[in-house]
Every structure is written in structure tokens, then in C-alpha cells.
Amino acid sequence: MDDILVYGANGFTAQLVIAELVNKGLRPTLAGRSKKIIKIAQNYGLNYKIFEIWNKQNTIQNIDGHKLLINLAGPYHDTFAPILEACLATHTHYIDAEGDVHMLQEMYRYHEKTVKAEIMLLPGVGFAIAPTDILGYMLTHKIEHGVQLKYAIHAGIKASKGTIKSFLHSLQTPGLTRADKNMITSLPAAKKMDMQVLDKKFKTYLHPWRGDSFASWLSCGVPDIETYSTFPAWVVLLLKNYPLSVAIGKWKIAKKIITAQGMQNISEADTTTQCYLSATLTSKSGENYTLKMIGPEPYLFTSKLISNAAQKVLDGKYKIGYQTPATAYGATLIDNIEGVKLIFE
């Protein structure tokens, strides 16, 4: 039986992940509830399974025998629990690309169960938190006694429909940042921060739904953590009026119009696009140390990160229990990814 099962294999990100896995010589089994998977599997000569995840025993039967499940079926607030419960029963390692702070907290509740089942629970293996988590991890292992960690991100792309749907769902719950070791409710775009990477300059705004404030507490142990992102001007205006953002996130017509702006097919992605990220660590003495990253197009970056993690799991390199990308693999997760460049200041 194939070692890897990719669930949600007909999705936007999934198709990029499948291509990367195949490029590594891996032969994943594709799975999901849509028959669209059949054509994708046939194109690669891969095995496939069509099944829903709502029947626990059926899900267990379909996952059993696989060493690793890669969950790319969103939204994760619906798919995570039933899939992980099946992974616990079958002792199958679990990876996904979730980046929402509330979902990462929810997933952490399964830490003890995954330790008992001797499997790794590794969410966030994608652009959503992996690159920032790695930057923070590298900084805090170079500079001791940091008291504040600030991330800034410029994706530079049009989001997929799935990403937009997830973001609109996140709007319904206030975001979180970390202050004095505690998670606190924070309003989006309430603060802004300038970021410069080489000759590129960006204005970034507080993005409290990103999972860095939770994940980087586990990987870096810094008491204050915030993340800032670039947004289109109209989104910044919307976020600054948070009650209106929440209302729009509930309106079916508005959600349909906004989601329609996202990418539907891989062919729409510009793989020549670069992303820019920075992590700034402030020491007790008030000195700032910054590590920056230039990376490939975010969805392509995600696919390479996931395929790297998958290969490591199959090679027997994993830690049991809940892990962040950095606690699991540190900077080795970005090894051999073309287009990644680090700049220390």
C-alpha cells in the first residue's frame, strides 16, 4: 500500500502538493469525496479512494495502512477532528497547512492523545506559518533572552478561493496576539509596521488570525508575539471597521462576491512571484535583530514545504505529539527549496 494518503486531493493547493510529491519519486494515494480526484489520479498513474469522513469506521478503514495522511481538505474546522480521530485509531501521522490561531489552539488539545498513539500531529506546514516559525526559531537560537518577536509578511499574490473562504470564517472570531506570555484578543489592522527586504518596501498591518502567536510560543518561547501582513487597500479599510468585517463575513451574497475574486485553478498562479518575510527579535536590552526571507510563490512554497515534511516522515524523522514546523524540523524544512534566501541584519 502507498505510504501517503492525500485527502482533499482535488483542491488548489493539493494539486501542487501532489506534483511535488511525484517529483520526489513518491506515489501518494489520492482521496476525497469528489470524483474529480479520479482524473487527477489517472494523470499521474496513482491510486485513489473516494470517501466521506463523517462515518468514523469507514474513514478508519480508508486510512488504515498508510504511514502519513496529508489533510488538504478545507475548511479545517470541519475536517480536522474526524480525520485526526481516524489517524489516532490507525497510528497514522498527520500533516496539514492550517494557519488560523484558533484552529492551532484547538489542535493542540490532541497533543496527549497523539503522544499516546505515537504519531506526529504537524499542522501549519505551509506558507501560513512555517516560514515565519522557522525564522523565529533561527533567531531565538542565535540570540538568547528575546522579549518580543514581530513578524511581517508580504505574500504578493491573489488568494485562492479556499483561502478566502477560510479568512471570511476567521473574521467571525476576534484574533489573538501574545503579550506577557498570554494570548490576548486583538483587533485587525489596529497597528501597522514598515518592512523592507533589500530594495522592496511594504506597509504591513496587524494580522491577529495568523497562528504565529501560538506556534512561535511553542517553538521560540518569546513572551510577546505579533504578526503583520500586507493587504489590499480596500481590505485594510474593511479590517479597521471590524464590526462591518464580521457582518460581511456573514452575508451570503457578500461572501459569494468576495470569494469569486480568488483563484480557482493552478494555471492562474504566477509561479514567478516572490514572497517576502521578516522576523524581528527584541532583546532585554532593547536591541533589535532581524532575519528576513525571500521565498517562492506562496502556494508553490507550501507544496514544497509539505513534500519536504512528508519525505522526512517516511524517512523515519519525526517527533511524536503536537509539533510546529520549527519544533519538528527547524530550518531543515526549507532545505533544497529553490528561491529561498535568508538575510540577517
Image (cartoon, rainbow, N blue to C red):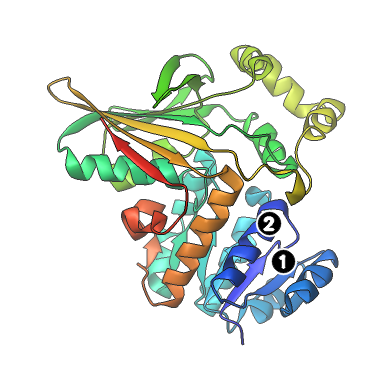
Question: Do residues under tags 1 and 2 come within 8 Å of each other at their CB atoms?
Answer: yes
At 32% from the left and 40% from the top, the residue drawn is 136
At 17% from the left and 37% from the top, the residue drawn is 143
User: Quick one: quadrant of the N terminus?
Assistant: bottom right
Q: Nearer the viewer, residue 246 or 146?
A: 146
Secondary structure of residue under mark 1: loop
Q: In the image, residue 46 lies at what x, y percent?
A: 71, 78
Q: Which residue is label 1 attached to?
A: 53
Quick check: can you spot residue 260?
yes
Q: Amino acid at mark 2?
A: Ala
Q: In the image, residue 161 lies at what x, y percent?
A: 75, 41
Secondary structure of residue under mark 2: loop
Quick check: can you spot residue 323?
no
Is 251 located above or below residue 241 in the figure? below
Q: Residues within 10 Å of mark 1 (few under 14, many from 20)?
A: many
Q: Quadrant of residue 19?
A: bottom right
User: Quick one: quadrant of the C terminus?
Assistant: top left
Q: Quadrant of residue 318?
A: bottom left
Is 306 located above or below residue 182 in the figure? below
At 78% from the left and 49% from the top, the residue drawn is 265
Mark 1 or mark 2, which is nearer to you?
Answer: 2
Q: Amino acid at mark 1?
A: Ile
Is 195 situated left or right of 149 in this image?
A: right
Determine the residue located farthest toward the bottom in the rendered image: 1
Q: Earlier in the sequence, mark 1 or mark 2?
A: 1
**Label 1 – label 2 distance at C-alpha:** 11 Å
Q: Which residue is label 2 attached to?
A: 73
Q: In the image, residue 101 lies at what x, y percent?
A: 50, 39
